[in-house]
Structure formats: C-alpha cells, structure tokens
Image (spheres, rainbow, N blue to C red):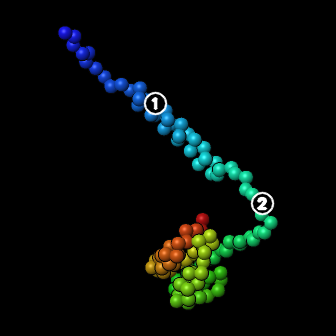
Amino acid sequence: MKSLKRVEGINVVPLIDIMLVLLAIVLTISSFIALGKIDIALPKASSQVKLDKKRFDIAITSDKKYFVNKKEIPKEELQNLLSTISKDDSVTISADKATPYEEFIFVVDTLKQKGIEKISMAVEQ
C-alpha cells in the first residue's frame, strides 16, 4: 500500500498570478489618474452656449457685517443669495481675524448645505 505524499508548503503560483493581474489593473488605471483626463475626441455641434462661471467674494467684518462682491448684504438676505449660487461657481471667503468664528461657520455651513464645494479662504502671507 502506497502512502500519499504530504505537502510541506503552500502553492504560491496562483497567488502570483492574481497579484500580476491586479498589478496590471492598477498600472492601467494609474495612468489615467496621473494624466488627469482620458483623451477623447468630442463631436462638434452647430449651436453653442458658453456658460460663464461666476465668482463670489464674501467678506465678513469684525462687527458681523456681510459683503458679497463688495456690496453689503444683511445676514437674512445672504442666505437667499447663497441659494442662487450654482455648484460650478467658486466662492472666496475673507473674514476679519476678529470676526466671531460662528459667523464664518454660518457661511461655510450654508454653502455646504447648498452643495457648493468650490470654497476658498483668503489669507495674508
């Protein structure tokens, strides 16, 4: 009667095959990420409308006054104005260093609730 040979190790060949496939996938995807775009040829159209992206500068003074594009706006109207901003528009917030933190958070929170992600803060170097 023959006895079966006992296997004394793990067969790593299937593991190496899986790792090589994963490596190929990662390298393929990383080239798209590194370039930041996928090259495609867009079709041409006869009718075109260029959408202008708007820029909003919101300033908050130390005495809790709000300015949008250098025009003073009451806090109640600011919330209505921020609801008209689209997600493609960019917003820059400048606040006096003596401004209460809650006023700054009010503006950022309102923008985030409206789904606006392009928010920048103005600072001095």
For label 2, the residue is: 44
For label 1, the residue is: 17
Percent of width and height locating residue 8: 28, 20
Q: Secondary structure at mark 2?
A: loop
Label 2 is placed on what type of residue? Lys
Tell how many labels. Answer: 2
Q: Residue at x 45, y 34 (%)?
A: 19
Which residue is at the front of the view, 33 or 104?
33
Which residue is at the front of the view, 100 or 42?
42
Q: Is residue 90 visible?
A: no
- Marks 2 and 1, how far apart at CA: 44 Å
Percent of width and height locating residue 26: 52, 41
Q: Nearer the viewer, mark 2 or mark 1?
A: 2
Q: Is residue 21 visible?
A: yes
Query: Is 83 situated left or right of 43 in this image?
Result: left
The N terminus sits in image quarter: top left
Q: Secondary structure at mark 1?
A: helix
Q: Residue at x 62, y 70 (%)?
A: 88
- Give residue 94's quadrant in the image: bottom right
Q: Earlier in the sequence, mark 2 or mark 1?
A: 1
Query: Is 60 situated left or right of 7 in this image?
Result: right
Above or below — where is 102 with respect to 124?
A: below
